Amino acid sequence: MTSRILEKLSRPIVGAPMAGGPSTPALAAAISKSGGLGFLASGNKDVALLEQDIRECAQLLRGEPYGVNFFYPQLHRTDPDAVKLLHRLLAKEYAKAGVPQPAIPVVDYSNDFLAKQDVVFAACKEGYGPKVVSSSFGCFTAEEIRKIHSVGAEAWASVTSLEETEVALSRGVDALIAQGHEAGGHRLTWDVCETPTPFSTAELCSMIHARHPDAVLIAAGGIRTARDVKVALSVGACAVSCGSAFLLSHEAGTSEANRAMIAAGGKTLSSRAFSGRIARGIATTFSLSHPDLPCSYPEFSAMVSPLRKIRGYEYCLVGERIELIRPGSAREILDYLEGKHVFPTAPCV
């Protein structure tokens, strides 16, 4: 297996797609212009906004490559009784916070996947689309991969286990993004109710590389320093994918509240209490006091959303070792990840 896109990069660093605001056209373009590969996150974004982001990113890059990530359609349907139970549980929290509680939401388990595919394919055919299309929470079918190839793009899939790896390779993906337990944001398990494997990024990459030495492997999760990059490349990865490392970048769309939380540091935990799906973020009063919530994504995420601006319910998804995340331009952060830049307050690692 080979990836024409990765082979052309002057840095083996991918800017991981981060849904919910941090991934902006400016950040994706800055990473790509600086020798890495920037990504747009379509996630649960409105289709029209995705189309706007693609056009803006393409204008900034003027022909240089970038990627677009999809949330793959969720097969699991949340138990309605569990949703009602959680709605009653949250009623107490809303009353305590003095905030009106929204009704039980109607959700789209597909995240407009087909419509977003159409937008990306149209952009590719017109010459300004992404050179890579990736999937989170699942894997493209063989037919979908053929369509991606037909418009001149590569198909990448995120995996969290050997089992997911086997399926992704059998379908013909061009590269695997192997996510370890250190990663911030949602764990990318294909089954929303599955308990993620405990493997670190290095362990998972080593296991995949041992079984499939020719697979194009991108290490994702907890990459903070030049040493982390070197470790990932030494265990079979040909590139790394960094998300949290760019949360404090000038170009990121990270909210001021979350920038302050990250700068202050603190403990992270992996829990369903953030959204109903296992995710790693900064521990809050609510997440610490609700360790055993049922599998309930995306309903729970929508039901708890209005509380997230209130102290104790914050929603700041970020990976381990927050203290190593530094503010700066995307180029400075890329230089730091290659050992070519030292931030004034950066630790000697």
Image (cartoon, helix red, strand yellow):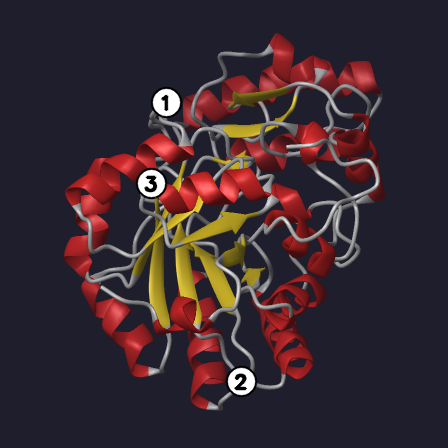
Q: Nearer the viewer, mark 2 or mark 3?
A: 3
Q: Residue at x 63, y 48 (%)?
A: 339
Residue 281 position in % (x across, y down): 62, 28
Q: Residue at x 53, y 71 (%)?
A: 66
Residue 278 position in % (x across, y down): 47, 28
Residue pointed to by mark 1: 198
Left/right of residue 320 with respect to residue 234 in the rendered view: right
Quarter of the image containing the N terminus?
bottom left
Q: Residue at x 77, y 57 (%)?
A: 329
Q: Is residue 30 above or below residue 298?
A: below
- Sequence order check, earlier mark of 3 and 1: 1
Residue 239 position in % (x across, y down): 43, 54
State the separation of the CA atoms marked 2 and 1. Answer: 39 Å
Q: Nearer the viewer, mark 3 or mark 1?
A: 3
Any mark on residue 235, and which?
3
Q: Would you call the spot at circle 1 few (<14 residues within 10 Å), some (14-19), or many (20 or more)? A: few
Q: Amino acid at mark 3?
A: Val
Any mark on residue 26, and which?
none
Quarter of the image containing the C terminus?
top right
Q: Amino acid at mark 2?
A: Tyr
Q: Do the residues bearing badges 2 and 3 touch, measured as CB atoms within 8 Å?
A: no
